[in-house]
Amino acid sequence: MRDGQQRGAQAGEIAARLRDEIVSGAIEGGARLGQDALAARFGVSRMPVREALRLLEAQGLVDVPPNRSAIVARLSRDDLLDIFDMRASAEPLALGLALPHLTNAQIDRAAGIQRDIEAAPLDRFGDLNAEFHRTLHAPCGRPRLLAHIDSLNALADRYLRLAIGTMDHQGPSDAEHRELLDACRARDEASARAVLMAHIVRARDTLAAAFENRTPQSGKPGKGT
């Protein structure tokens, strides 16, 4: 493997590891990510670390000020609303484009993922939820749109993991997913787009309320959610 390819592969791996830690909350918002410390941790030079941080910056997970350590982006209600409002625009578009090409096998695969969601522990909800939607959007044939949606879902997962254990989100979400599957099987584009839009907006409002009620000490939702 050439040096550039090796460095790119290292950067991708480092970015994926750090992304998981940021999304899970293991690395909290506001934490500084020094290049020297990360290079020592991963046993690489600073160059792949720098590239990894740029990848995370492009995903909205870190800020990289000039000549300073990268800083993990803080969670905020405004950021949450921005993410979900963009999802509410992008995902119905992708679904509408995908639906004429969506096969019964792909719908069955999404239904299988939904069964996994209903049986899985809460800490797997975000990944499985993203995979459910990704399966239905995949035939849209718009790789930039799909990459944009994947990036938004990665950002949304930080908020889901913050609140999912203390709010009544998964029950309504399961029902909405089943309704969405029914609309897809019927090839009813208008209903499918409407169900998906309402699904994202309800999640936005539920998460925003949970975020507002989080305890200042822990950053996690309080008992009133």
Image (tube, rainbow, N blue to C red):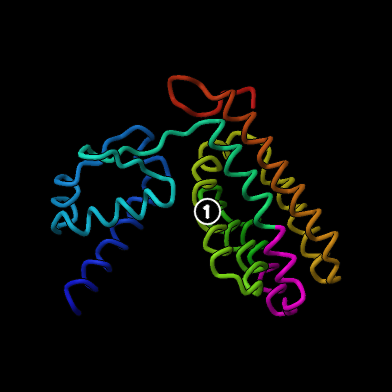
Q: Quadrant of residue 96?
A: bottom right
Could you tell me which quadrant the N terminus lies in?
bottom left
Residue that appears at 68% across and 51% down: 89
Q: Is residue 96 magenta?
A: yes
Report if residue 98 lies within the magenta region: yes
Label 1 is placed on what type of residue? Arg
For the C terminus, the image quarter is top right
Identity of the residue drawn at 22% across and 54% down: 49
Q: Residue furthest top?
A: 216
In the image, is 18 to the left or to the right of 39?
right
Give the residue pinned by disc 1.
124
With respect to residue 99, does 85 lie above or below? Answer: above
Q: Position of residue 157 (x, y in %)?
A: 52, 47
Q: Is residue 1 left or right of residue 93?
A: left
Residue 136 drawn above or below residue 55? below
Who's the residue at 52% across and 53% down the image? 124
Q: Main secondary structure of the magenta part?
A: helix
**Quarter of the image where one finds residue 191:** bottom right
Residue 81 in the figure: left or right of residue 218: right
Above or below 138: residue 208:
above
Q: Observer-nearest residue: 148 or 29?
A: 148
* Residue occupying image coordinates x 62% and y 74%: 141
Start-end of magenta stretch: 92-112
The crowding category of the residue bearing disc 1, from other C-alpha atoms within 10 Å (few below 14, some 14 to 19, many at least 20), is: few
Pick whichever, 94 or 173, lies toward us: 94
Picture coordinates of residue 113 (x, y %)? 63, 65
> For this rendering, which residue is in front, 211 or 95?
95
Relative vertical location of residue 142 with respect to residue 215 in this rendering, above or below: below
Provide residue 125's location: percent of width, then percent of height. 57, 52
Q: For the residue labelled by badge 1, is the local secondary structure a helix, a strand or a loop?
A: helix
Compared across the picture, whether 62 is left or right of 144 comes to left
Residue 58, x across and y down, in percent: 40, 52
